[in-house]
Image: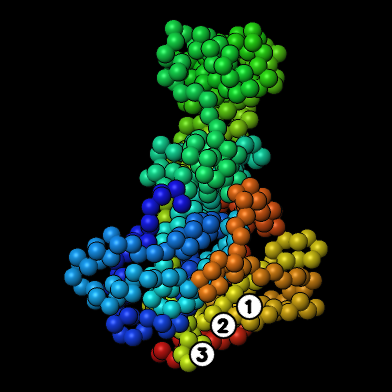
């Protein structure tokens, strides 16, 4: 974790009151299963990206209550001495399963399941949601922006507009998973290996008598990173001409200009012509300034001459929809070694949970390797690779479809076993590559920004029947 502090107490207060309640009721060791899932894809998109698991692992490894925590809880005057004594020797002993980072994920899928003593499995809810909700949101937004750029590199420039220090750092990490080429956040490079990128601000140019002196001084010091900010005064009348003069004199191996304001399409077309006329066809044009996937898509369609983008506040805050909305719900308990499914029923259909201990399968077409659908199934239930398999819409059982020529992949991995981590987190570059590979397996129709094709997530018949029977039993 970036903060070198004990984050055990970063939790909703009711997690502690419930823990004390379970302890006093003699229920602290009863086994419970909790699922994390989300209900809706941000921006009405076709998919989301799983991120934040590595930080969940670090948090669970470091769970402990120190003396300061115990004394704080004692000061509240509502927790028993026996409970506080128990917390002094607290050890995480749960089992955890999760979908790996970088995986495209969809509503209602159990992306994390925690099984263990209810007091523990309940307590970790807040941090699991905090870490996965935030990074999945930013990774999803970054993925949309990167796709809009159509192969042009996108740099994450949002550090100064993030909602906190940790939001800046973990947001930079998540944006890299989502496909960004690098970040302006230096500490993210140090901590995670997300390449730190950047050259100069307008203040650098203003510190010199003119743009020519500012650019010349910079290029002399950084000839391999010579991207010059040309919009401090006037892009076409002074900025670009000064950059051309410096590039012609010093001929740095990597030449570029950055435009941070104005009409992007118009200015880049004019700047491109000026650079080409000067024989600087290899000079790149970088654009920044309050960009998002829609602006990037539009200026490209308008013929803007852009080689890469710097995207700040609208990515790091996911400005268009800044909440991921993941939830953490009880799915089952164990009584005398027998699993008892649990369900939450609501007047709002979307808030009805899916009971039982589950796993998640993705079915792929053998010829194209494209993903066909996801199946949520009961744990231990296998999806057969047969000549023909029938799936149905769990919200409308009469809608049935037969698929064939497919193969099955279980998306979830075992992360903790009896409180010990049994999963080795991939490197950030491996996660980024995996994310790109998995997105390539998704149909283009479901990646549209507007009205994407629905990717179907179905329940196995046995799971659907269990859920339906339990709903009927509550009426």
Q: Are marks 1 and 2 in contact (CB under 8 Å)?
A: yes
Viewer-proximal residue among 451 and 394: 394
Q: CA distance from mark 2 to mark 3?
A: 23 Å
From this viewpoint, is residue 132 visible? no
Viewer-proximal residue among 212 and 236: 212
Front label number (2 vs 3) = 3
Of label 1 and label 3, which has the lower sequence position?
3
Label 1 Cα crowd, 10 Å radius (few <14 / some 14-19 / many 20+): many
Viewer-proximal residue among 335 and 272: 335
What label sits on residue 337 in the rendered view? 3
Q: Which residue does the image show at 38% across and 56% down from the upper left?
A: 6
Where disc 1 sits, the SS reads strand
Where disc 2 sits, the SS reads helix
Left or right: residue 325 compared with residue 113: left
According to the picture, the residue beneath numbered tag 1 turns out to be 392
**Residue 137 in picture, x, y percent from top left:** 48, 53
Of label 1 and label 2, which has the lower sequence position?
1
Look at the image and tell me in which quarter the C terminus lies: bottom left
Above or below, comparing residue 355 to residue 37 in the picture: below
Front label number (1 vs 3) = 3
Q: Which residue does the image show at 34% across and 71% down from the upper left?
A: 87
Q: Which residue does the image show at 48% across and 86% down from the upper left?
A: 334
Q: CA distance from mark 1 to mark 2?
A: 10 Å
Where disc 3 sits, the SS reads loop
Classify residue 243 by image quadrant. Answer: top right
What label sits on residue 464 in the rendered view? 2
Left or right: residue 184 compared with residue 25: right
Above or below, comparing residue 413 to residue 10 in the picture: below
Classify residue 196 by image quadrant. Answer: top right
Front label number (1 vs 2) = 2
**Residue 259 in picture, x, y percent from top left:** 52, 24
């Amino acid at each position: 974790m970036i903060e070198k502090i004990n984050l055990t107490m970063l939790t909703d207060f009711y997690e502690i009151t419930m823990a004390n309640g379970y302890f006093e009721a003699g229920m602290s060791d009863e086994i419970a299963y909790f699922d994390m899932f989300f209900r809706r894809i941000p921006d009405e998109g076709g998919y989301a990206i799983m991120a934040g698991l590595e930080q969940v692992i670090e948090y669970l490894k470091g769970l402990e209550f120190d003396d300061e925590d115990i004394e704080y809880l004692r000061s509240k005057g509502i927790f028993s001495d026996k409970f506080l004594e128990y917390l002094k020797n607290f050890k995480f002993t749960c089992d955890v399963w999760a979908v790996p980072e970088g995986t495209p994920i969809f509503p209602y899928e159990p992306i994390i399941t925690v099984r263990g003593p209810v007091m523990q499995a309940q307590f970790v809810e807040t941090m699991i949601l905090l870490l996965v909700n935030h990074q999945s949101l930013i990774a999803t937004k970054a993925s949309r922006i990167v796709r809009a750029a159509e192969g042009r590199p996108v740099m994450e420039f949002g550090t100064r507009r993030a909602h906190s220090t940790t939001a800046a750092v973990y947001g930079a990490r998540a944006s890299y998973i989502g496909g960004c080429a690098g970040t302006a956040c230096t500490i993210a490079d140090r901590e995670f290996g997300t390449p730190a990128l950047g050259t100069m601000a307008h203040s650098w140019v203003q510190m010199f008598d003119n743009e020519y002196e500012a650019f010349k001084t910079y290029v002399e010091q950084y000839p391999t990173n010579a991207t010059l900010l040309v919009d401090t005064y006037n892009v076409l009348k002074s900025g670009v001409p000064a950059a051309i003069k410096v590039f012609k004199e010093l001929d740095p191996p990597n030449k570029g200009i950055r435009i941070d304001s104005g009409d992007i399409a118009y200015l880049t077309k004019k700047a491109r012509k000026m650079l080409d006329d000067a024989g600087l066809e290899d000079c790149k044009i970088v654009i920044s300034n309050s960009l998002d996937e829609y602006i990037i898509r539009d200026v490209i369609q308008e013929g803007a001459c852009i080689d890469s983008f710097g995207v700040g506040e609208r990515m790091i805050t996911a400005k268009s929809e800044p909440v991921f909305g993941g939830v953490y719900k009880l799915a089952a308990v164990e009584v005398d070694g027998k699993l008892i499914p649990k369900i939450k029923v609501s007047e709002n259909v979307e808030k009805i949970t899916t009971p039982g201990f589950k796993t998640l399968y993705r079915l792929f077409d053998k010829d194209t390797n494209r993903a066909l659908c996801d199946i949520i199934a009961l744990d231990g239930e296998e999806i057969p690779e047969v000549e023909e398999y029938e799936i149905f819409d769990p919200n409308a059982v009469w809608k049935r479809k037969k698929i064939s020529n497919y193969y099955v992949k279980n998306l979830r991995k075992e992360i903790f076993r009896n409180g010990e981590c049994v999963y080795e987190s991939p490197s950030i570059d491996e996660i980024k590559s995996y994310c790109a590979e998995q997105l390539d397996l998704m149909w283009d129709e479901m990646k549209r920004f507007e009205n994407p094709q629905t990717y179907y997530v179905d329940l196995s018949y046995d799971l659907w029947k269990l859920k339906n029977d339990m709903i009927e039993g509550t009426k």
